[in-house]
Image: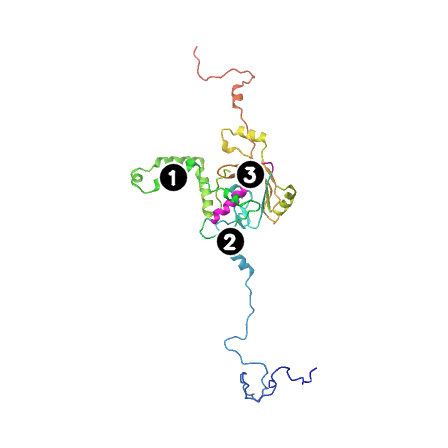
Amino acid sequence: MSFRKRSEVIGGNPMANARVPAGVSRPGVPARAPPVNGRGPPVSGRGPPVSGISASRGPITPVSSKAKEQEQFDALMKNPGVRPSLITSQPTISTGSSDLDKIILHQGLPIGCSLLIEESGTTDFASVLLRAFASQGVIHNRLEKDQLHSHTIVIGLGAAWAKELPGLYKGSSKEQKKAKIQENESKVSVSNLSSAPNSNRAEKDMKIAWRYGLNNKKQQEQENNTVYEHYNNQFDITQKFTSLTLILENLADSVIHLQPFNQQMSALIEKAYKNEPAKIQQGLVNIFKLPVLSDKGMMMVYEGEYAFKNGRKKFEIEEWGIPVEDDDSNNNNASHDGHDHGPQTTKNIDF
């Protein structure tokens, strides 16, 4: 217990509570003005006003979250590998296949969404799309020196897998030779200046392109590619747990399924397009879910409407149509009555 007075501060200065006459200042305490007649004594604990600071201050307004989101969106859209979606204006990235970007409806995969690729059978076409997606990220990182635009992470594969990624498609051997010849012709030299330009050939090519409408298609493709020059590239492509499938389908925002043709269907297609091997398709592309309207994806199912083919230039997806096989030899040689009268002639016979 303490027997000190209530007014005495314990451990404090005993002279702190002593009264000081007006006009006398304590050491370390600013002097107070003498009391004015008609007014009460000055309030204790109140010091003189500090100059330079206004008495009234407004409320402190925090930076709005919308402004931060807009800054992040603007910085993201400056990335050469990102473009806005054609439907929702979300920032999207390319899957490495221009045809796959089209059937997803956004002209790419929206950032923050996932894509699940399923495949039945013993083929491995899904790995082609995976390699194209990883290669697209590598190309985006090589656009500017000492600046990374993407970060690709591959789970479950060794480091040697990255060495097998496809490079950029530079055209066939004939196209590369033509490009070298055009480069040499464009250089200023005595031989190039002395030779007259081949204008007649260029005019014929323009007439053919205008007649068949090829020039309009090229102009549309060039306009789309010039706006986002480095968004999508072409690659030189020359090279499962069933219990988790349903869970992964529910977690993914978009799901596609690659269904290769069986041997009979492959033989029929090869026979129908024996003169046009570039049209031979290897399987169907079934769409089970698309990243539209909700986080879980729009439940849009397209089965048997698209087909894919894996070529040297790129992984192509196009509309599926049943090939028609024409038996020209049987139709031309057979007669109406079912008898073979032999080949007919259109020349007049003089008796």
**Which of the labelled discs sits on residue 201, or is there none?**
none
The relative height of residue 148 versus residue 132 in the rendered view (above or below) is below
- Amino acid type indicated by mark 1: Lys
Residue range of the region highlighted in magenta in the rendering: 120-141
Q: Is residue 210 visible?
A: no
List x then y, in percent, for residue 199. Answer: 34, 37
> Is residue 138 inside the magenta stretch?
yes
7 and 349: which one is in front? 7
Q: CA distance from mark 3 to mark 2?
A: 32 Å
- Amino acid type indicated by mark 3: Phe
Q: In the image, what residue occupies the spot 53% across and 59% down?
A: 68
Q: Which residue is mark 2?
A: 76
Q: Which residue is mark 1?
A: 180
Q: Nearer the viewer, mark 3 or mark 2?
A: 3
Within 10 Å of disc 1 (Cα), the crowding (few <14, some 14-19, many 20+) is few
Q: Which residue is mark 3?
A: 125
Q: Tell me the SS state at disc 3.
A: loop
Q: Earlier in the sequence, mark 3 or mark 1?
A: 3
The relative height of residue 64 versus residue 221 in the rendered view (above or below) is below
Q: Nearer the viewer, mark 2 or mark 1?
A: 1
Q: Is residue 99 left or right of residue 205?
A: right
Q: Earlier in the sequence, mark 2 or mark 1?
A: 2
Q: Earlier in the sequence, mark 3 or mark 2?
A: 2
